[in-house]
Each structure stands twice: as C-alpha cells, then as structure tokens.
Amino acid sequence: MKIIKLLIIEDNELLREGIKDLLEAQRDIKVIGEMGNGESAVEKLLFFKPDIVLLDFSMENQDIAEVVRSMKIEVPAIKIIGMSLIPTQTDILELVHAGADGFILKSATVEDLIRTIHEIFEGKKVLPPPMAGSLFHQVADQALLKGKKISKNSVIMTPREKEVIALIVEGMSNKEIAIELNIATYTVKSHVHNIMEKLALHSRLQIANYARNEEAF
C-alpha cells in the first residue's frame, strides 16, 4: 500500500490540528508536517519531501499564488491542493495558473477531502463542483491563448519590466529584486504579474526560459 505523505499549511491552529487528526486516521495518509506560514514552508519543502501540500489559500498577508509558484519551482513533482471557505472563480483561476492541482472547500465533508487527496495523488485535477463548469471554460480559453506563439515583436515591455525580467533570469527572488531596484516588494509582484499577462505565461521559471530562448530582453 502506497503511503501518501502530506504537508498541511493552515494559519488557524485549531483547524490545522483538526485536519491532521482526521487524516491520520487514514491508513494510507501520513501527515509529515504542519505549518502556519506558506512562505516558510517553501524553504522547508526539501526537508519534508511531501507528495501533496494541503494549502489554505485564504491566509492573510501572504501572496499565495507566489507561494504555489515557488513550491512548483522548488519541487516540480509536488501536488498542491488549495482550500478555502468561500473562494471566488478569480482566486481559483489565478492559482490554477500558478500550478495548483486541485481545490477543496472547507465546508466539504471528510469523505470529500480524502477522495480529493487520492484523486490528486493519482494525477487528476479536482475543482469544487459548484464552479467547475464555468471555471473549466475560463481555463480552456487561457490554455488556447497560451498555445499561440507570442512574438517578441508584438510584446511591449516597459524599461522597468525589462529590468525585472533580467533579474528573474539571474534567479533573484521578489525581495532581492526589490532591494536591487530600490522599490517595494509588492511593486515587484505587480511587475511580475504584468509580465506574465503580456507573455501569457504563469510562472517565473517560464519567464526566465522565454527570455533566454527569445533573447528578447
């Protein structure tokens, strides 16, 4: 029997402990760690080595999409399940693009949570039933857009965006870029978001690869 190693990231300690107790009652699920901060968890992924991360994407004062992207860069094979009480389609779509593999509502039953974990582990994508239909249409439209070749001649980058791209290619984090350019971290995040929108990409790694391949910047 394959044991699914799972890391829980939830800033509500009571809920975190409750989820842990429920999941540890399952014979094939092992909770190998629990944390209350997504950004700190990224730094410890190689230590925990989970198969799946159960991530609260309504945590305050954290860029959860960036956390998801960073986790996927750190451990590409990792599976990420987002959970929230009342997610919007925009929230979920953003995290789909960031690399999340599935979502579970906090109002879901224990059986739904366990089924979602198993399906994600098997390589499936799982979205909350109430919004899956319309969301799939949005994701499909985005996928079609990304399937088209983005010509460097059709993309206009600002001087600052070009600077940010160059530093991303060098492997700098948002914080490091902010220090280098003497701007706020949230401003860097905004530039990165705009760059991904213009290039129809969804990760920093893809930005770096695109810049190297196109030699556009």
Image: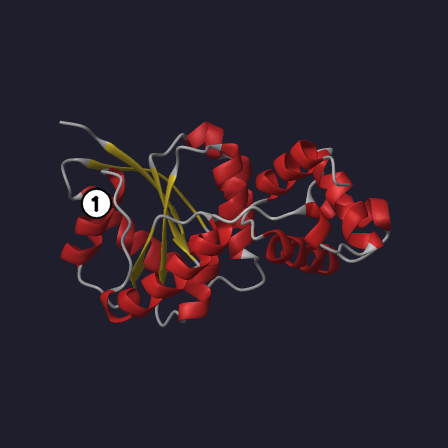
Q: Viewer-proximal residue, 216 or 11?
A: 216
Quadrant (top left/top right/bottom left/bottom right) for the N terminus: top left
For label 1, the SS is: helix
Q: In this view, does 87 lie above or below 77?
A: below
Q: Viewer-proximal residue, 199 or 65?
A: 199
Q: Viewer-proximal residue, 108 or 172?
A: 172
* Residue lying at 50% horizontally and 50% vertically, measured from the top left: 146
Image quarter of residue 129: bottom left
Quadrant (top left/top right/bottom left/bottom right) for the C terminus: top right
Q: Residue 25, percent across and down?
A: 16, 44
* Residue lying at 54% horizontally and 49% vertically, measured from the top left: 202
* Residue lying at 55% horizontally and 36% vertically, measured from the top left: 43
Identify the residue under disc 1.
Answer: 119
* Residue lying at 59% horizontally and 38% vertically, measured from the top left: 205
In-image side of 162 versus 62 (left or right)? right
Q: Is residue 195 at least partly visible in the picture?
A: yes
Few, some or many residues within 10 Å of mark 1 (<14, 14–19, 20+): some
In-image side of 21 versus 173 (left or right)? left
Q: Residue 92, percent across and down?
A: 41, 62
Image quarter of residue 4: top left
Q: Name the residue type under label 1.
A: Glu
